[in-house]
Image: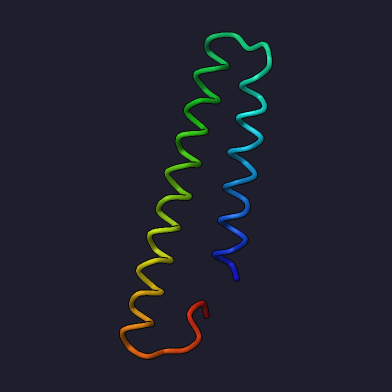
Amino acid sequence: MIDDHLARAHRKNIQRYRLILQTNLTESERQFVERRVGEEQSKLEMLVRSLSSKVHHDQSTGRENLLD
């Protein structure tokens, strides 16, 4: 469940930053927000890979409860 909450938080942050990018920003503000979008996307991708490997591991060991 914690993983679900983390993924949701990262997605919300990405959405929020993308909305901010649609506003009038200075170049340094834009660079900061773009960097934050990249960081959030990277964290989300790492989380998804982690979940995928956990699901794969659980399937290969026969565990039924995939997300403890």
Figure check: 25 above or below 40: above
Q: Where is residue 54 in the image (x, y as percent from the top left)?
A: 39, 73
Which quadrant of the figure contains the N terminus?
bottom right
Figure check: 50 above or below 39: below
Q: In this view, does 14 lie to the left or right of 50?
A: right
Q: Position of residue 49 (x, y in %)?
A: 38, 59
Q: Where is residue 21 in the image (x, y as percent from the top left)?
A: 61, 21
- Total tally of numbered discs in the picture: 0
The one nearer the camera, 18 or 2, is: 18
Q: In this view, does 40 lie to the left or right of 58?
A: right
Figure check: 33 above or below 61: above
Q: Where is residue 26 in the image (x, y as percent from the top left)?
A: 59, 9
* Picture colour scheme: rainbow
Image quarter for residue 22? top right
Who's the residue at 65% across and 44% down the image?
12
Figure check: 50 above or below 14: below
Who's the residue at 61% across and 29% down the image?
18
Who's the residue at 57% across and 48% down the image?
10
Who's the residue at 35% across and 74% down the image?
56
